[in-house]
Image: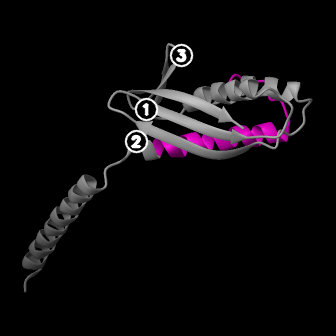
Amino acid sequence: MSLKLKGQTSLELMFLFMVIVGGILLVAKIYYPSDASVSLTYQLKSAAQDACTFLNEGVVVNDTVHASLDRVIELNNYSSLNCAVSGVSVNRTSSSIDAEVYIAYSSNLNATLVSGAVRNYLVARLSRVNGFVLRNGVLYFRGYPVNLGVVVK
């Protein structure tokens, strides 16, 4: 076989391989779509765990993202809240996303205060993540408004 035919055969095989791989990716995308709920759940849980870690450290950093948590730490006398994320729930409708983050903590602080502080932190933190946008005080994820609630036990 001549060198010219070997080169042509190699190019044909590469083209055939690219067509097969492209077809597999196309079929995989149809059967395994990127689910916004899964991505949102991951981002919420990660941010909520960061909030709990911050509240457990008891150190104030004085920046805009952590401002609401700084206030909770100050009111708790710079002590750990023994905060933990106990769950995340995401329900996507055709027009919005309802998300709940469940937090457990042990402190004498008002649950409403802690809930509001964690929610404000989540909105501030997530608004800096790709896919999220904060417009007029409403957090959007991939174009859907997110109704975010924080339940504290």
**Magenta span includes 57:** yes
**Amino acid type assigned to the residue bearing label 1 in the image:** Ile
Dot 2, how many residues are within 10 Å of its Cα: few (below 14), some (14-19), or many (20+)?
A: some
Q: Quadrant of the N terminus?
A: bottom left
Position in image of residue 41 (x %, y %): 51, 44
| Residue at figure coordinates x 34%, y 27% from the top left | 95
User: Which residue in the protein does label 1 denote?
Assistant: 97
What SS does tag 1 mark? Answer: strand
Q: Which residue is mark 2?
A: 36
Is mark 2 in CB contact (under 8 Å) with mark 3? no
Q: Mark 1 vs mark 3: give the one in front.
A: 1
Looking at the image, is mark 1 or mark 3 earlier in the sequence?
1
| Badge 3 density bin: few <14, some 14–19, many ≥20, Cα 10 Å | few
The residues bearing labels 1 and 3 have C-alpha atoms spaced at a distance of: 16 Å
Closest to the observer, 129 or 1? 129
Q: Which residues are magenta?
A: 39-64
Q: Reading the chain from its start, which is encountered first: label 2 or label 1?
A: 2
Residue beneath the point at 86% across and 31% down: 108
Image quarter hosting the C terminus: top right
